[in-house]
Amino acid sequence: MFDRSIPVIGFHTLVDSHEGIEALIRLMEEALIPKGVNTLIAEMRYEFRCFPEYSSGKVTYEDASRLADVCEKHGVRLIPLLPSLGHQSASPAGTPLPLLEKHPEFIENPNVSKDATWPEIYHHSWCASNDGIYEYFFPMMDEIAEATRCEVFHVGLDEVFDIGMCPRCKDKSPAELFARTVKILHDHLAEKGLEMMMWGDRLLDSISMGYQMWEGDRFGMHPALHMKDMVTRDIMICDWHYDLHSAGYPSVETFIKEGFFVMPSVFHVADNAEHFWTHALEAHYLTKRYNWPGRCGGIVFTNWTCLTNEYVDNMLKALRGEEAGDDLDAMVGKVIVRLEARARKFKQWN
Ligand SMILES: [Zn+2]
């Protein structure tokens, strides 16, 4: 069981190669673990043994196992991430990932050219009514869970735009389609003795909360938040917001009141990250004061570029407080430096 009494000081990253895994290990050992990071969410572009033809990258079973060894040695909780439902595109966005490309019957909106980009399409989704997808997706999840020896699996579920569009789905409620997908993934993990983590954005009403349509939902999925028998409260939620919202971030409080273990998740702009975390601490205070059922479970720093040695070199410079410029690598490093002391303090308060 994942020990929820230990607040998460988390780092999320994309990684797509052997070199990237080695660079990640260096980053963890040289800087992030000494700075208090105790949880690693690894979104691996992976070379599957079960379905080599549907691989999305070059991270192998051996790479993932080596990462697990290193995490175990340092007492870091390793949580693998495999995007489900949405984020099923390669590049450009009109090109589906190999699984959907070879099985177009799983694509929710196939009427998009392969070279299409935003705003013609954001990302492909799989069809939430065609459960044939799980004949492929479950073995993929299981393989990654085995390689990483994880206790928690992050299933993504963020930024789903294509839902309720295909002939099979168009008369169904997007919220129910989303909630049943959550339940199917959750129950598969539970059968394996694993807990589930997901991004929270599809459960948020973007309009009433003042969020944009990536960090909140505009396509009818958010009522799934209240479908408690499907979106069960044992799920851990990463509530990400990368823009600055001057009136605050009502989602943190909402998730806590609903009973979730929620982790505010930040990205590359230090001022925005600090603003979000300051507001999250208000929610943490109110939770204790009013005995709300959930809790703020920590913070997750995210990185949305696949790691290379060069990227990590510059990020390490920023993490050491050296001049590192303003590229993303340096910016992500600076966010951690800015919030490090307060994240540690949060760890002590809990
Ligand atoms: Zn469909």
Image (cartoon, rainbow, N blue to C red):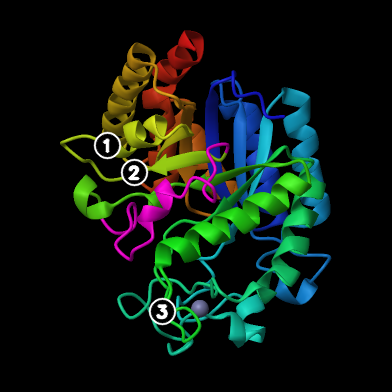
Q: Which residue is the site of mark 2?
A: 241
Q: Earlier in the sequence, mark 2 or mark 3?
A: 3
Mark 2 vs ligand 1: CB under 8 Å?
A: no
Q: Which residue is the site of mark 3?
A: 171
The residues bearing labels 2 and 3 have C-alpha atoms spaced at a distance of: 31 Å
Mark 1 residue type: Tyr
Q: Earlier in the sequence, mark 1 or mark 3?
A: 3
Where residue 219 appears, as percent x and y from the top left, is 33, 66
Tell me the element at label 2. Answer: loop
Mark 1 touches mark 2? (CB < 8 Å):
yes
Mark 2 residue type: His
- Please state the extent of the stretch shown in magenta in the rendering: 212-234
Point 54% across, 81% down: residue: 107
Mark 3 residue type: Asp
- Give the side of residue 190 with respect to residue 291, left or right: right
Point 46% across, 50% down: residue: 227
Where residue 336 appears, as percent x and y from the top left, is 43, 30
Point 81% across, 48% down: residue: 147
